[in-house]
Amino acid sequence: MAELKSLSGDAYLALSHGYSAAAAGLAYGAARGPDAARGYGALGPGGDLPAVPAPRAPATAAESSGEQSGDEDDAFEQRRRRRGPGGAGDARRRPREQRSLRLSINARERRRMHDLNDALDGLRAVIPYAHSPSVRKLSKIATLLLAKNYILMQAQALDEMRRLVAFLNRGQGLAAPVATTAPLTPFGQAAVCPFSAGGAALGPCPDKCAAFSGTPSALCKHCTEKP
DNA sequence: TAGGCCATCTGGTCCT
DNA sequence: AGGACCAGATGGCCTA
């Protein structure tokens, strides 16, 4: 899952607009790396999410697990026989208390996974993508990747907005008082130039940012101009 | 039918 | 000792 380890540049900014399912797909597509070969490319190219009916309901605990029921012991033994090496278990019959302990462990694990899925559902609910019955629910891995990208995008937008506010304040002669009293210029550098993100690779902005250098910003037409 | 995604079971490990 | 967490294995469902 190292494909998004250093999300930056175009891939990063590509998330800034239209964070719909399509954008989600783009973002997710950008994440394709070695993992894609393992099947993490379920979202189609360009973010086309196949339209499917509502997600199937997960099997209930009683359906397939080791909760108490009449013929579940048979099912349990069948599963045990099916298990291969390294799987779930040995072939010998267990004492009743061990079996009971196993059932309780299974139930706990099931509950834990359900909690995890609930948390993932909560995450899906707050990240912007096309929430629609006709759109397939995001997979777990897609949810996590999309959430990460969304957080990065929000952080960048917030940072840029802070710099812009500081810059506007400075233009109105409010820099000195505001910088010391208001939270509009929380960053030292932002109190000077809104568009200097700290990078020194680029030259100074030819106009209002002339005294400063930094990362180009879409909020400054000069900063976005080619030299 | 193959591949993707998922739920579940299970044993191992670590922590309290 | 018991619970939480993790990873491997397995089988079911769904879609292309």
Image (tube, coloured by chain):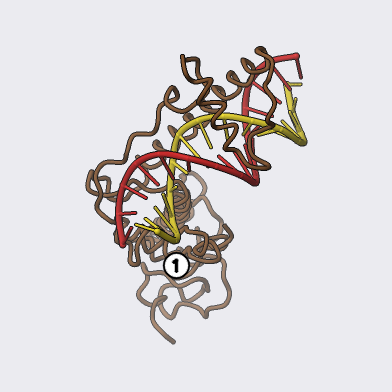
Chain colours: A brown, B yellow, C red
Percent x, y for residue A222?
A: 38, 77
The answer to whether B12 appears left or right of A156 in the picture is right
Q: Compare residues A172 and A189 and report the one nearer the observer.
A: A189
Q: Secondary structure at mark 1?
A: helix
Give the residue pinned by disc 1. A11
Which one is nearer the viewer's eye here, A162 or B10? B10
Residue A109 in percent (x, y) is at 56, 27
Give me the residue at 23% from left, 43% from top.
Answer: A133
Location of residue A100 by image quarter: top right
Q: State which quarter of the image contains the C terminus of chain A.
A: bottom left
Image mark 1: chain: A
Picture quarter with the N terminus of chain A: bottom right
Whether residue A174 is visible: no
Q: Is residue A66 visible?
A: yes
Q: Residue at x 50, y 19 (%)?
A: A67
Which percent across, then down, holds residue A77? 57, 26
